[in-house]
Image (cartoon, rainbow, N blue to C red):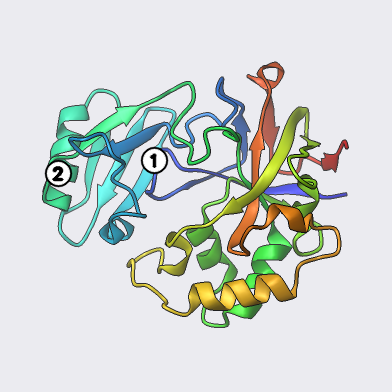
């Protein structure tokens, strides 16, 4: 039986994640505190890793019980902030780091997911990430997990098990993690971020080319090929219905396909 091996949430979009032993489904279907905060510019465009590689060099650690974040970079000494009460200080910190005016925004109910239609946690099999480490011998599984920024990592499966969680055309697949039910919607389309070193932002120019070739070659027989307009896709985007709000999941929970 597959089990939930790890849970990772990303309180500030594009910054470091937090490895958790449990998490609650929030009102928007995402995990509580995941992408709850985001950085935007004066035109309300995300200041994220897709647009600004230097964000990779920012380090963040959290005490979410008390809404505390500790930030550090080569540019600035480590500083501690309250995510709710120190908004002005945080915006000053980020503005100094990026060299232009940056604002901190919050959406406690829905967060700021990349996929508005499939706003639940993303999911991947640990064996998948281990397989990727074979494709890229200079990268280990931990680095690949940092690059792909997936929320739920499932153990005790074969590689690409997560491809079972979506069907042909627009067909979704219901699955259960502990007591919470989700729908697998589609394979997650990837951007430039996984091709970059998660700590420095340095880009591997051959990453996408190698990934595309290997993903196409190793596509399992259970994968719905019609969902791939291109093969730069990995992990599954999900959705959680209103009935699942408030439910808890935790590491060690069984993960089973409901059909």
User: At which x and y percent is residue 65?
Assistant: 44, 28
Please tell me which of labels 2 and 1 falls first in the chain: 1
The residue positioned 53% from the left and 77% from the top of the image is 209
Whole-number angstrom distance, CA of label 2 to CA of label 1: 20 Å
Q: Nearer the viewer, residue 82 or 206?
A: 206
Extreme residue in the top direction = 243
Relative to residue 239, is residue 89 drawn left or right?
A: left
User: At which x and y percent is residue 28?
Assistant: 55, 23
The residue positioned 48% from the left and 37% from the top of the image is 113
User: In the drawing, what numbered circle is on residue 250?
Assistant: none
Do the residues bearing badges 2 and 1 touch, measured as CB atoms within 8 Å? no
Q: Nearer the viewer, residue 78 or 148?
A: 148
Relative to residue 253, is residue 68 drawn left or right?
A: left
Provide the secondary structure element on which disc 1 rests: strand
Number of labels in the image equals: 2
Q: Residues within 10 Å of mark 2 (few under 14, many from 20)?
A: some
User: At which x and y percent is residue 66?
Assistant: 38, 27
Q: Residues within 10 Å of mark 1 (few under 14, many from 20)?
A: many
> Is residue 245 placed above or below 37 in the rendered structure?
above
From where the camera sits, is residue 130 visible? yes
Q: Which residue is mark 2?
A: 95
> In the rendered image, which quarter contains the C terminus?
top right
User: In the drawing, what numbered circle is on residue 62?
Assistant: 1
Provide the secondary structure element on which disc 2 rests: helix
From where the camera sits, is residue 155 visible? no
> Is residue 121 placed above or below 75 in the rendered structure?
above
Q: Quadrant of residue 151?
A: top right
Relative to residue 163, is residue 7 drawn left or right?
A: left
> Is residue 191 placed above or below 112 in the rendered structure?
below
> Is residue 56 placed above or below 211 in the rendered structure?
above
């Amino acid at each position: 039986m597959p089990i939930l091996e790890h849970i990772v949430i990303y309180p500030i979009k594009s910054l470091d994640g937090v490895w958790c032993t449990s998490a609650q489904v929030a009102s928007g279907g995402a995990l509580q505190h995941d992408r709850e905060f985001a950085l935007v510019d004066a035109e309300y465009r995300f200041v994220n890793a897709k647009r600004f590689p230097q964000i990779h060099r920012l380090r963040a650690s959290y005490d979410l019980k008390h809404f505390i974040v500790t930030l550090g970079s080569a540019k600035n000494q480590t500083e501690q902030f309250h995510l709710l009460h120190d908004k002005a200080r945080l915006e000053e910190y980020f503005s100094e780091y990026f060299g232009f005016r940056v604002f901190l925004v919050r959406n406690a109910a829905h967060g700021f997911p990349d996929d508005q239609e499939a706003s639940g946690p993303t999911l991947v099999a640990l064996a998948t990430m281990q397989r990727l480490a074979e494709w890229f011998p200079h990268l280990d599984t931990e680095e690949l997990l940092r690059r792909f920024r997936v929320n739920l990592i499932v153990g005790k499966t074969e590689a690409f098990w997560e491809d079972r969680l979506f069907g042909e055309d627009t067909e979704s697949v219901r699955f259960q993690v502990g007591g919470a039910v989700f729908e697998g919607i589609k394979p997650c389309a990837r951007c430039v971020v996984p091709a970059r070193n998660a700590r420095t932002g340095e880009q591997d120019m051959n990453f996408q080319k190698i990934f595309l070739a290997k993903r196409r070659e190793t596509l399992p027989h259970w994968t719905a090929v019609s969902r791939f307009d291109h093969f730069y896709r990995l992990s599954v985007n999900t959705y959680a219905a209103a009935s699942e709000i408030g439910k808890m999941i935790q590491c060690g929970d069984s993960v089973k396909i409901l059909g």
